[in-house]
Amino acid sequence: MAGNIRPSGDGYLVGTFTADEAISRGQFVYLSDDGEVSVADLTAHPVIGVALEDAASGAACTVVRGYCFALAGEAIDIRTSSELIVGADGRAEVADADFATTAGFVVGQALSDAAADGDLIPIYCQPFTSTNDYS
């Protein structure tokens, strides 16, 4: 179930795909070889967006880019850095020394602090490749 990508009218692009595994709201996802979406870890595949809601394996998964909410993988202080990469379990982490392990992919910008791992925070999801060196 690929395709069906459309502007939402609320500042983001949205598409509907089939989930290749169980996916939680706020996890970053990538498009797998069979055209389905899986939870991203960014070591092998670039992110296409963030899951808008929970999806079971084989079910429809709505994926968004632009203004949305993502699960934080750690405490995030936007006064220190707001550029995000994907950490463990498809969650947002700050692009710092770990940046070198992600093949240079920045997935967006945090728009609010996260107190801890598991917080759902507003972000602007705009995956791109960066040449910045955070090490």
Image (cartoon, grey):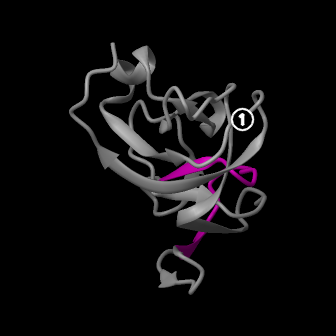
Name the quadrant containing residue 97. top left
Split into 4 quadrants, where in the image is the N terminus?
bottom right
* Drawn side of residue 102 relative to residue 39, left or right: left
Find the magenta span and give its range.
13-30
Q: Tell me, yes or no, whether the highlighted magenta stretch contains residue 19.
A: yes
Question: What residue sits 45% from the left and 49% below the top?
Answer: 47
Q: Is residue 86 magenta?
A: no
21 vs 13, left or right, is: right
Name the residue located 73 percent from the left edge and 56 percent from the top edge: 57
Residue annotated with mark 1: 114
What quarter of the picture does the C terminus occupy?
Answer: top left
Q: Position of residue 2 (x, y in %)?
A: 49, 74
Please tell me how many numbered marks the rendered image carries: 1
Mark 1 residue element: loop
From this view, report whether residue 95 is shown above or below residue 48: above
From the viewer's side, name the closer residue of 4 and 8.
8
